Image (cartoon, rainbow, N blue to C red):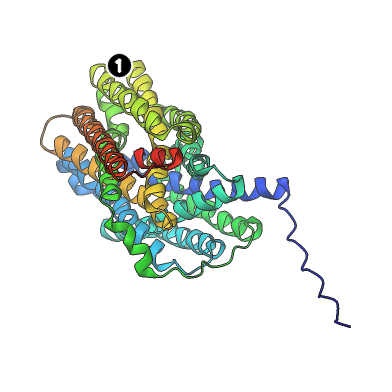
Amino acid sequence: MTAPPPPAAPAPSPLSSRRRALALFALALGGFGIGSSEFVTMGLLPEIAESLLPQMMAETPDQGLARAGWAISAYALGVVIGAPLLSLLAVRFSRTTLIVVFAVLLTVSTLASGLMPGFELTLLARFAAGLPHGAYLGVAALLASTLMGPGSQGKGAALAMSGLTVANLAGVPLLTALGQSAGWRAAFLVVAGVFALTAVLVALTIPAQAAPRGRRLKDELRAFRRVQLWMVMVIAAVGFAGSFAVFSYIADIGRQVAGVAPGYIPVLLAVAGLGMTIGNAIGGIGTDRSLNGTLLVGFPLYIAAMLMMVLVVRSPVGLTLTFFLANLAHAILSPAMQTWLMRIAGRSEMLGASLHHAAFNVANALGALLGGAVIAAGYGIAAPTVIGTVVATIGFGMLLATLVMLRLRSRRRLAQLDQVGIELAPTRERADAR
């Protein structure tokens, strides 16, 4: 008589709705800290310039402001380098481990940003703070998609970005006000505390995931062979640079061009954050319904808002309204661009998710540099609105050219398959068209 088979291992208990909500909140909290860290620099740029570059600000304030903008570009450069690098190095690690490690790195580097005594060391700290940015948001998007269920790539990307957009709605304005009253360093110390709390919460709430098996570094690197991946990254980098050319210098545009009081700058930032929050939600839902449709509607709205800003920038009401619309349209596009990169990357989805943030911060650096260049060249503080509109329009032109090329390539492949008598399944045809 054979022995009875051993009892089956009990199935893992499903995640409770409460713990799922807490886990999603923890992921979004990290995004809140990232958004606060990245954008509060723009709101406090005049204070940072006066503190770290006093002689230059006294002699040539326009050049001093442009030089202080390097802090924005240093952070963005850190994201550009760190997003793919950390994603590739982490290919064999559990995502639950990674999210905790990245949160700790964000804590330490942001703390250093608020403590460094000189401009050069502050630049270095801002660069270090940018390194885990894209990798954190990339892993957060994947974890959120898993927690939310199949077919939720767009919503997962939007959830990961929701903390960033809410940061602009509430965190950045409040931190800007704090920095104006208590010194810009205080703002970064508070953000470091947010990251420390994030590290604790993600460690306690995110369900454990096993490390990926069978994935090697060279498997991830294959994603870079895809021309479409590079094309999408360039579209994001160029197109989004338009809004960053304005956002990087919004404090001085508001004060010196629109004539608002310094206390109104947090209001401007809150208005931008409201636009980002609404746009991000619309973009997440729209992307899961139609990625191409979201792009083709979002980009014209974005360009129209930027163009309107050029025309009404000297009006406080006009600047406020168009700044809201530009950030709303920009945020609609963000989940679509990230989802597009994740689909192109295929099995290297973590790399694809993080590359969106690398491209996003190329746009950040490029926008800050272009905006600073036209200011330093003597074209005036309002000049970033013009260069921003031009750059955004170029990005849209690149998007249209890419979509046309992909459509022609898809038709050519279908024609070739038809010639040899192979019928393509409808779902595959749609995937190729994307």
Q: Please state if 385 lies on the left or on the right of 175 as rendered.
A: left
**Mark 1: few/some/many CA within 10 Å (<14, 14-19, 20+):** some
Q: Place residue 432 in its image quadrant.
A: top left
Picture coordinates of residue 339, whole percent (x, y): 42, 43
- Tell me if residue 284 comes above or below residue 41 in the rendering: above
25 over 196 or under it: above or below? above
Query: As rendered, which of 358 and 166 lies closer to the eye?
Result: 358
- The residue pinned by badge 1 equals 315
State which quarter of the image contains the N terminus: bottom right
Please report the residue visible at 20 percent of the width from the left and 33 percent of the height from the top.
394
Residue 66 vs residue 339: left or right? left
Q: Describe residue 105's horizontal placement relative to residue 378 as left or right.
A: right
- Quarter residue 84 falls in: bottom left
* Snapshot quadrant of residue 382: top left
Q: Is residue 199 above or below residue 277?
A: below
Q: Nearer the viewer, residue 54 or 240?
A: 240
Q: Pinpoint residue 6: horizontal percent, then vertical percent.
A: 81, 75
Q: Secondary structure at mark 1?
A: loop
Tell which residue pokes out farthest to the left in this image: 377
Q: Nearer the viewer, residue 48 or 278?
A: 278
Viewport quadrant of the C terminus: top left
Q: Answer yes or no: is residue 180 visible.
A: no
The residue at 30%/27% (across/down) is 255
Q: Amino acid at mark 1?
A: Ser
- Res. 43 visible in picture: yes
